């Protein structure tokens, strides 16, 4: 009856709001997850989330591209030379202290075996080997300080920041996802909530159209649902971009 139809008109904005919220939440989840491709990986274009039979999160699928763009944006605002010029060589050497012993032990043994006559290093008594390594460790801080001073003068030739970050992000996609979520928490919350608000507004419009075009009510219902899902995603993203 008319009372039932009135009830549907009143409920429709809330239904559209729920659809708008759900589609935005789903879109966000599909942006970040799954980290690795899920499905039958017969074919997946490079840097694309959609395969022939499966899906990978947009961000992890484009990990190399996104990491590269992030580094370029960062270096536009950040002077790498200025950052490294502020590093105190002595403090750097001191902070490296705990790892120097292990590092030098491996380096000394490797270099000695490479440059001494075959088998000579292994014939040296173990306590003598340890003394040599300890002496190297004692000299390491001053060596590291000098090395850092040289590196600071030629940091762009020594450090390929983009390659380093891209390699790390591709190897650990979850880390990149965590960074994006941490940085974009406000934007993510906005997109989720805007889906509900925009969906509610579209639902009011849909209810009005449904009232005047009752003979095509199912077309209005399904087409309206599609428009709500698409429009809430598109508008939310455009608003955040602006």
Image: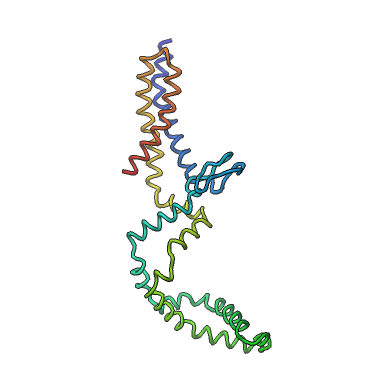
Q: Front-most of 124 and 47?
A: 47
Pick whichever, 3 or 63, lies toward us. 63
Question: Residue at 57% of width from left, 46% of height from top?
Answer: 37
Residue at 39% of width from left, 71% of height from top?
155
Outermost residue, left side: 242
**With 119 as the anchor, is 237 left or right in this view?**
left
Quarter holding the N terminus? top left
Residue 54 placement: quadrant? top right
- Image-based side of 229 in relation to 117, left or right: left
Q: Outermost residue, top direction?
A: 1
In the image, residue 242 lies at what x, y percent? 31, 43
Q: Where 58 sits versus 137, above or below?
A: above
Q: Quadrant of residue 52?
A: top right
Is the image coloured rainbow, by chain, by secondary structure, or in one colour?
A: rainbow
Q: Residue at x 52, y 77 (%)?
A: 100
Can you give x and y, in whole percent of width and height, for residue 210 in the image? 39, 17
Q: What is the x, y in percent for residue 109?
A: 61, 81
Please give the name of the residue rendered at 62% of the width and 42% of the height, measured from the top-left corner: 40
In this picture, residue 205 sits left or right of residue 179: left
């Amino acid at each position: 009856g008319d009372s039932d139809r009135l009830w549907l008109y009143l409920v429709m904005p809330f239904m559209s709001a729920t659809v708008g919220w759900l589609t935005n939440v789903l879109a966000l989840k599909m942006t970040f997850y799954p980290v690795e491709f899920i499905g039958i990986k017969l074919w997946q274009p490079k840097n694309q989330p959609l395969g022939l039979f499966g899906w990978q999160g947009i961000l992890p699928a484009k990990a190399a591209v996104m990491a590269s763009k992030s580094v370029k944006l960062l270096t536009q605002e950040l002077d790498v030379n200025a950052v490294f010029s502020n590093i105190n060589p002595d403090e750097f050497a001191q902070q490296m202290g705990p790892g120097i012993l292990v590092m030098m032990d491996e380096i000394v043994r490797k270099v000695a075996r490479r440059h001494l006559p075959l088998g000579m290093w292994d014939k040296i008594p173990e306590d003598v080997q340890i003394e040599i390594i300890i002496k190297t460790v004692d000299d390491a801080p001053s060596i590291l300080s000098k090395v850092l001073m040289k590196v600071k003068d030629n940091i762009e030739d020594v450090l390929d920041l983009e390659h380093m970050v891209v390699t790390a992000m591709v190897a650990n996609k979850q880390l990149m996802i965590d960074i994006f979520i941490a940085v974009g928490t406000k934007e993510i919350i906005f997109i989720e909530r805007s889906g509900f608000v925009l969906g509610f507004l579209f639902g009011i419009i849909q209810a009005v159209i449904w009232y005047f075009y009752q003979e095509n009510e199912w077309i209005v219902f399904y087409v309206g649902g599609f428009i709500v899902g698409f429009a809430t995603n598109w508008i939310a993203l455009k608003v955040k971009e602006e």
